[in-house]
Image (cartoon, rainbow, N blue to C red):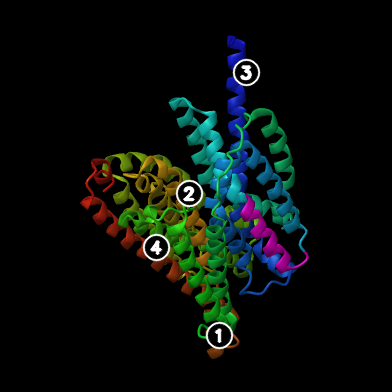
Amino acid sequence: MSSKDLSRADSRRWLALGVVATAQLMIVLDLAVVFVALPQMQTDLSISLADRQWVVSGYAIAFGGLLLLGGRLVDYLGQKRMFLAALVGFAVASALGGLADNGVQLFAARALQGAFAAVVAPAVLSLISVTFTEQADRARAFAVYGMVSGSGAAVGLLLGGFLTQYASWRWCLLVNVPIVLVTVVLAVATLRPDPPAVKGRRYDLAGALTATLGLVCLANGLTLAEANGWISVVTLGSLAAGVLLLGVFVLVEARSRQPLLPLRIVSEPHRALLYLAAVLANGAQLSMFLFLTFYFQNTRGYGAVQTGLAFLPFAIAIITTAQFSAPAVVRFGPLPVMSVGALIGAAGLFTLTRLGVDSPYPTAVLIPLVLIGVGVAMSLFPLNNVVLLGIDPKDAGVASAVVSTTQQMGASMVTALLNTLFAGSVAGYLLTRPSDEAAATMHGYRVVFGWESALYLAAFVLILLAQRRVRRAVPDQVKAAA
């Protein structure tokens, strides 16, 4: 091959990276892009206070519940083939959501988006791996991937603000259609063809179905508790069904020859503790967006763009901390850094419990957002390093995928629970002071921010327990994490 041909092939590789990075950014920011638009969605489609969390949870549950199955489909049917098919499906689901006439249609479209995102995400990782085989290029490619994934929430909040204020909340979803069209055209031209599809493989459909339905039932039970009470038949029935289905999922995985989640992945105590810590920490920080959005727009009267900009210190804190915490991870190990980060995140969330109707933004909001951003970057970004330590190479992919699953599980379960606690707190306050709705709403905010802080503290304890477990492990590389 001539030097000219090599140069052309090299440029196509980097163009391909731009294509898959765009797709990754789209599916990451799609969880956050609706936060700023949610108040208008709720008003326009007459969505109840209890049900509004399904705009977030519908996407997160489908994404997290089907992510492992999506990875299997990509491995067996081809990276490029599944990448293109899932992108087209994501565009169709986005269009359905943008054109929804009621809440049920919107929730269903968001779930469909999450299902296709569960295929796009592992396809992006696989395509980067097969496109960049040299160590230096691969490091650069994954650095781009990490930057895109880490900044997705910030981009989503800003984009959602501008689209909601200057167009409509519907464009927060419809904007994906032209992006996908351009991405698909470029992907066809730049991505290398797939090898022949693997035949004779079995798919763990029973595992995917029971896991996803179990999460849906749990989230539904947490939502029903607001209107029906925690001890009502429908609430307890939905929660019991969720627990039962997740129990069946464990049995299915234990007996399956090709399980979605080999149970040896989560049987290691330190890894199980860290996965649970990730569920709590991710749920706490992602649900914070929901309640601060309503505080900014409904209590303080911010516009959508102003709301997006109000979150900017959080994004800047995350990006800055991610750059400067790497030397600390090398020097002290990831787990000590993660534990300090969890404490900082808990402190930032607890500071939000002092919010009032007229609290000054610089001291009451900006400083807590910076603390939370620092805490999130320190406590969650090193997680992949730790869960992959001492693991069999054949399990590395699924162990890493579970990290993404915990993020979606945290977003769905914790948001559903705290939304119910918020509504119950407001209603309880109004029973004693029926004329003071503003104070009741602020009381609800303070309750959920307090719970978010407690969840982050629980994550801190789990990280400390994981650190003790790691110190007892034999391999030197695992000890280095502590």
Q: Position of residue 202 (x, y in %)?
A: 55, 49
Going by the numbered disc 3, the residue's amino acid type is: Arg
Residue type, mark 1 in image: Val
Q: Residue at x 32, y 55 (%)?
A: 268
Name the N-terminal-most of marks 2 and 1: 1
Q: Which residue is mark 2?
A: 401
Main SS of the magenta segment?
helix
* Residue interval drawn in magenta: 101-116
Badge 4 amino acid: Tyr
Q: Is residue 102 magenta?
A: yes
Residue 440 is tagged as: none
Residue 110 colored in magenta in the image: yes
Residue at label 4? 456
Helix, strand or loop at label 1? It is helix
Q: CA distance from mark 3 to mark 2?
A: 33 Å
Camera-near label (3 vs 4) is 3
